[in-house]
Image (tube, rainbow, N blue to C red):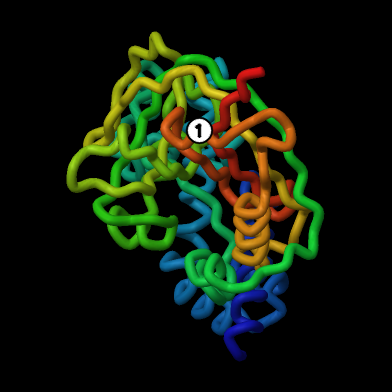
Amino acid sequence: MNNEEKNSAVRRMQEYIMAHYQEEVTLPDLAKAAMYSPWHALRAFAELTGKTPIEYLRSVRLSAAAKKLRDTDMSVLDVALASAFGSHEGFTKAFSREFAISPQRYRKEAPPIPLFSYYPVRVKTATPSQQKGNDIMASTVIFTQVIERPARKLILKRGFKAEDYFAYCGEVGCDVWGILESIKGALYESVGLWLPEGMRKPGTSEYCQGVEVPVDFSGAIPEGFDIIDLPPCKYMVFNSEPYDDDAFETAIGEVWEAIERYDPKLYGWEWAPEAGPRFQLAPVGARGYIEGVPVRELKK
């Protein structure tokens, strides 16, 4: 099987797991979804995800269970059964091994833990940085709107020199997102951020990942993370049309091109790069690529 076929086969298995993780999932089920023999399916999956299908399935189930413990009043036993674990004891052992905390203690304290983050396997083409330098003509409509964010705080993990997602993951790893997703009381979903100079520490990167929380947030801050104040800020949000997940870098490039050519003054706004971080949401093809740039209203 070539790289494209392998990519497609593994992604079909990922999608099958995400759709059926609350049910019994067997290797023959996954091989059928992959449309390859069990041996080839298992080998390809481990190569591209770094996990066996059983390890991957367990991580999905346990992270879903953690969210139920954090956000609902379901008993530990009910959460265990809803997560396809056959017993309270088996679930407790698996949960404690995965997150180094018992489900009972996690429910009580809800500290940040490294939740599983779903990333469909993709064929990597050019990086967004490379695409930014190309002459990209947007082939899709880019929607814009202005949103307003109140004063809030930002929990973030800083990098060292990173200017984009790929460099950031190379510096700090790809587990930051799962930890951010576990933070109870977050105002919005986790984001990638380009920090203005005034919000950077010496020797740290422009790009980072973080999640916004209320100004009175009193929860635990993950080890190695910072929390900073964010002032009220308005954002011009750019949203591409939906796209195929394999084309996420093209969608990012098209939005970047649109931002570069956009003149906010025509609509009564101006860029305000020091007013707050520029942000990007996780690229999800079904909703389009979304990025926000800080703006301020022009004085009349």
Whether residue 146 is situated above or below residue 300 in the rendered picture:
below
Quadrant occupied by the C terminus: top right
Whether residue 300 is situated above or below residue 44 in the rendered picture:
above
Type of the residue with mark 1: Ala
Residue 24 seen anywhere in this rendered image of the structure? no
Left or right: 253 with respect to 233? Answer: right
Residue at horizontal 59%, vertical 61%?
120
User: x, y (%) of residue 171?
Assistant: 28, 58
Mark 1: few, some, or many residues within 10 Å (few <14, many ≥20)? some
Residue at horizontal 58%, vertical 75%?
123
Whether residue 190 is situated above or below residue 208 in the rendered picture:
above
Residue 248 is drawn in which quadrant? bottom right
Residue 116 seen anywhere in this rendered image of the structure? yes
Residue at horizontal 47%, vertical 19%?
185
Foreground: 284 or 233?
233
User: x, y (%) of residue 216?
Assistant: 39, 9
Left or right: 222 with respect to 9? Answer: left
Residue position marked by numbered label 1 in the rendering: 272
